[in-house]
Amino acid sequence: MVTLAHRLRRVAIVFASILGTAYIILVLIALLNYNPRVKIGMPIIVDDAELPGAGTRCKMDPDLGPVKVDIYTKPCMEELERMNPEIQAGGAWKPPNCQSWQKVAIVIPYRDRLGHLKILLRRLHPMLRKQQIAYRIFVVEQAGTDQFNRGRLMNIGYAEAMKEDNFDCFIFHDVDLIPEDDRNVYLCDDQARHLSSAIDEMRYHIMYYNYAGGVIALNRQNVLKVNGYSNDYWGWGNEDDDFSARTLAAGLMLTRPPEHIGRFKMVRHLKADRSNHGNSYFFTWRSRWKNDGINAIKELNYKVVEKTDLPVFTNISVDIGHPPDEKTWNERNKNQESVTMLWFLRFYYP
């Protein structure tokens, strides 16, 4: 007679076999689907005495680390000036006793978020000085009341910054993200460096494998290589995905700091309206990316309404035009080739 203990033993064996088989299948799927696109680490130039010219370059302070970030108290502009007496008009600074590895332009797309901007500036200026980086902060403000177009503002920020200086590195920075660790170095490498690898609103994990939103750094050559951002995402959403797909098509890796270093807090706010055509437009990114970007910026006929070198940042107010009406939009995009659903799924779930 089969005892209860014998039956339980057989069930345990079957259950263990199922778990073992499932584990082997998952391992095989992971091996077959391995994607080396993302690399975790710090920029090679942070602390490498063997690099050419390293003797005269600025050295990173070994005591840098995490800091306590206040996302609720909003300083006034006068307080920011008092806190940063070394800053030159326009929000520029460079190390006085050594040569920075790169000239860095920080481009912040902006509208109606003055409190967020003050909180960010209070954090950025002292952090960048600790990192011994030559930098200038450009706040690119969209004039008017049309839907926000983050991509256009990024591209315009690049173009206007290059009129001011021959910057080596561009950091495209959302106004509501505040870095929590001074070791998260605001420099570019030879790839697309995604600095915001762990955001508190996302439980300090990356949203998905190819995510490239929030804060991302590219050198001047790579900004042109990916053709910047798309100019045609009106409203919130998908312009980051489009940008990530461009870096993928251009053969760039995403490099990220470790999650314990790439931590950011998000200043709380109401979410903006989503793009009316964001998802459908993203499906056509491959047929557009070489023509829809920085190389098309002159066709936008944008107008700089006002450019002011304020004490702690350069403000560039721009009229970027208006979104197309529904008929014009449909006519423009009816013959665009879409990516396959398989590509779409592999992009989000590689």
Image: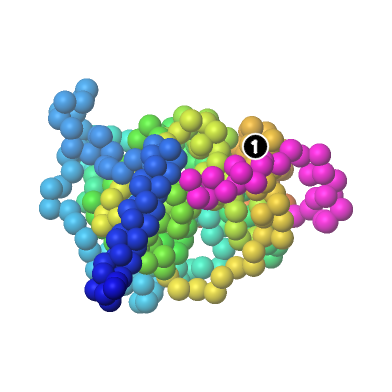
Residue 276 percent across, percent down from the top left: 71, 60
Q: Which residues are magenta?
A: 323-350
Q: Residue at x 57, y 63 (%)?
A: 111
Residue 81 percent across, percent down from the top left: 33, 63
Quarter occupied by residue 10: bottom left
Q: Is residue 343 a member of the stretch shown in magenta? A: yes
Nearer the observer, 323 or 274: 274
Q: Residue at x 35, y 35 (%)?
A: 189
Say if 63 sits above or below 334 in the image.
Answer: below
Q: Residue at x 67, y 60 (%)?
A: 275
Residue that numbered label 1 is attached to: 286
Q: Secondary structure at mark 1?
A: helix
Residue 106 percent across, percent down from the top left: 42, 48
Q: Quadrant of the N terminus?
A: bottom left
Residue 62 percent across, percent down from the top left: 13, 48
- Taking the image as drawn, is residue 132 in sight? yes
Nearer the observer, 264 or 135: 264
Query: Left or right: where does residue 212 sit relative to residue 142?
Result: left
Nearer the observer, 256 or 122: 256
